[in-house]
Amino acid sequence: MFYTPVDEDLLGLPHDSNYLIYRWGRTDCRIYFSAAQKGGAVTMHLASDKAGLRQLAVALSEFCEHIFNEFNWCQMIFGIIGPRSIVRLSERCGFQRLLTNDNATVMVRYR
């Protein structure tokens, strides 16, 4: 379950006025997602507290399913990821590497 947080510290989650903000519904941790439409795709970011790090795989998989269910037009989800540990985690959640440079990896998950 996801909801839109109100007046919460978003843990440095990248976003601007074009992004929708979601919080994963678990109460034992805080995991936030931001999502913006880019054509027939969604660009997403995430932020987590320390307790949420162990739950990221579940939260990320559920978030992708939520986006695909909520937005029929969405054919793919992009994530721009820095840490290699998160790249590996996203691969376990069905993402594929699209491109990599010295600073980040662009990952994509198709519908």
Image: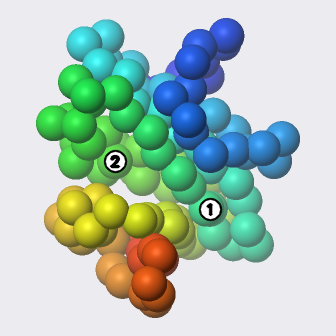
- Relative to 81, residue 16 above or below: above
Quadrant housing the N terminus: top left
Q: Residue furthest front?
A: 102
Tell me what residue is drawn at x 26 percent, y 28 percent.
Answer: 50
Q: Amino acid at mark 2?
A: Leu
Horizontal side of 66 relative to 28 (left or right) equals right
Q: Secondary structure at mark 1?
A: strand
Report how far apart the C-alphas of labels 1 and 2 lie in the structure.
Answer: 14 Å
Q: Is residue 110 above or below residue 17?
A: below
Q: Assess whether mark 2 and mark 1 are in contact (beta carbons under 8 angstroms).
A: no
Q: Residue at x 31, y 11 (%)?
A: 27
What's the residue at 31%, 39% (across, down)? Answer: 59
The residue beneath circle 1 is 42
User: How many numbered dots are placed on residues in this image?
Assistant: 2
* Residue at the spot of label 2: 60
Residue nearest the viewer, comparing 68 with 47:
47
Q: Amino acid at mark 1?
A: Val
